[in-house]
Amino acid sequence: MTVRDALNTALDEEMSADPKVFLMGEEVGEYQGAYKITKGLLDKYGPERVLDTPITEAGFTGIGVGAAYHGLKPVIEFMTFNFSMQAIDHIINSAAKSNYMSAGQMSVPIVFRGPNGAASGVGAQHSHCYAVWYASCPGLKVLAPYSSEDARGLLKAAIRDPDPVVFLENELLYGETFPVSAEVLDSSFCLPIGKAKIEKEGKDVTITAFSKMVGYALKAAEILAKDGISAEVINLRSIRPLDRNTINASVRKTNRLVTVEEGFPQHGVGAEICASVVEESFGYLDAPVERIAGADVPMPYAANLERLAVPQVEDIVRAAKRACYRSVSVAAAA
């Protein structure tokens, strides 16, 4: 099953199960979605539940939050999360804070979803990763699926959740195919929010990643295995709440940590994970934590520079070898 189909079927099943769920965004209806995630849903549920909007993120996000105030369950699509900047006042001030400010009397069951982070050749204004922006805000839950199982289970969980959820997809993963079990295909399937998944067990070094970087981490683990390094790969799934218990338990086993993310290094997800491990498992570390992140520059448009600005498999391999004191210095290689 492709990630695209996983998201589509999750939306379809949740709309079928709950008449309060509706979709809203640019091109979600007549055009079947900019990335065809909402394909077929307009024909099935009609224009009252699949609403095409003008190009006005602030407008339709505000309408969505208002609908959630009144008990509906909107799923708001941003064509890219870069455009959510137009609506960030409603996401943060209207959605995230209302439950607290109303002393729990008002819930805001809304999902903000769409592609996040780098795609390919779309430049700085369409390539930004907003995981850490939204994950820093109390009142929001932030999810980042990797596989089809993640996409189905986490999107269903997000729609069913009584609080606002930022759901960060990746454009380059939409067409990726992953094996899924009968359990995942069941309409009742749902994944817990705030729980990471150990994609591959290992004993020498822990590698944490989310979204597209999980695939890179798994490829790096295959290469490392050929050099006798057993890497444990953790798919974070949930950025807020962060599954600190799983991360720390793994580090206490492997004694080494490499964090991987596409976003900027400063104040990143990896920095938060590093802080958690230093606070809770410092005595278990046998090497400095390695952080792999995007370059600290706006995303270049040129393909050769874009590749240099985004973490690659070989970057993860080198970091893991450094953590295991297995790296070869340039002088020694010469």
Image (cartoon, rainbow, N blue to C red):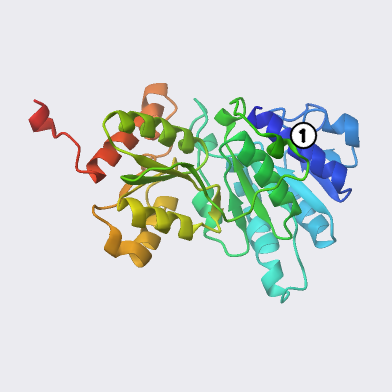
| Residue 294 location (% of width, % of height) | 39, 40
Residue drawn at (41%, 58%) of the image: 248
- Is 280 situated above or below 85? below
Say whether residue 202 is left or right of residue 25. Answer: left
Q: State the residue position of label 1.
A: 28
Q: Position of residue 271 (x, y in %)?
A: 38, 55
Split into 4 quadrants, where in the image is the C terminus? Answer: top left
**Would you place residue 7 above or below residue 271 in this image?**
above
Residue 273 screen position, x and y as percent? 41, 56
Using the rendered view, name the quadrant where residue 172 is placed. top right
* Quarter the N terminus occupies: top right
> Is residue 54 among the parts visible in the rendering?
no
Residue at (37, 66) in percent of width and height: 280
Q: Residues within 10 Å of mark 1 (few under 14, many from 20)?
A: many
Left or right: 15 in relation to 164: right
Between 112 and 210, the one lying in front of the other is 210
In screen coordinates, is 294 left or right of 288? Answer: right
Can I make out residue 300 in this image?
Answer: yes
- At label 1, the amino acid type is Val
The front one of 156 and 126 is 156
- Looking at the image, which residue is at 40% across and 51% down? 270
Q: Residue at x 83, y 39 (%)?
A: 51
Residue 94 picture location, percent across and down: 70, 62
Q: Secondary structure at mark 1?
A: loop
For residue 33, which quarter of the picture? top right
